[in-house]
């Protein structure tokens, strides 16, 4: 007997849970969408896949001071 792939979950297949959120965080989420569960579900999926989308990843870190060339290689 072969196993059949299960279809992707439909909204009716989802489980309802209760969570406690900081009111300020909920306000920020509600500015994005009228359905906070979609934002939270997407964030959890990205977290489980190891994806992160942070501001610090959008910029390069540059060395504080450029490296000094070895003695004798200065452009005198």
Image: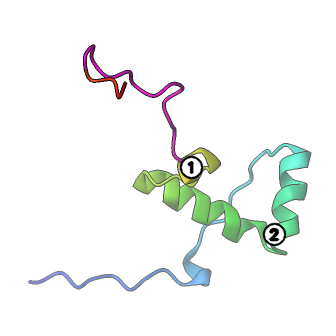
Foreground of the two, 1 or 6: 6
Give the class, few, some or many, for how many residues have Cα within 10 Å of label 2's Cα (few <14, many ≥20).
Answer: few
Q: Residue at x 52, y 52 (%)?
A: 52
In the picture as drawn, the residue positioned furthest to the front comes out as: 76
Q: Which residue sits at x=61%, y=82%?
A: 11
Can you say whether 5 is above or below 16 in the image?
below
Front residue (pair 57, 73): 73
**Hey, which residue is sitting farthest left in the picture?**
1
Q: Are marks 2 and 1 in contact (CB under 8 Å)?
A: no
Q: Residue at x 86, y 65 (%)?
A: 30
Residue at the spot of label 2: 32
Quadrant where the C terminus sits is top left
Q: Which residue is mark 1?
A: 59
| SS state under label 1 | loop
Q: Residues within 10 Å of mark 1 (few under 14, many from 20)?
A: few
Determine which quarter of the picture holds residue 15. bottom right
Name the image quarter holding the N terminus.
Answer: bottom left
Q: Give the magenta-colored segment's residue range.
A: 60-72
Residue 59 vertical position relative to residue 43 in the rendered view, above or below: above
Question: Disc 2 or disc 1, which is closer to the eye?
Answer: 1
């Amino acid at each position: 007997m072969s196993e059949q792939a299960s279809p992707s979950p439909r909204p009716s297949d989802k489980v309802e849970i209760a969570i406690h959120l900081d009111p300020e965080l909920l306000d920020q989420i509600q500015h994005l969408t009228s359905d906070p569960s979609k934002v939270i579900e997407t964030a959890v999926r990205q977290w489980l896949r190891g994806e992160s989308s942070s501001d610090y990843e959008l910029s390069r870190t540059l060395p504080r001071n450029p490296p000094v060339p070895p003695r004798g290689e200065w452009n005198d």
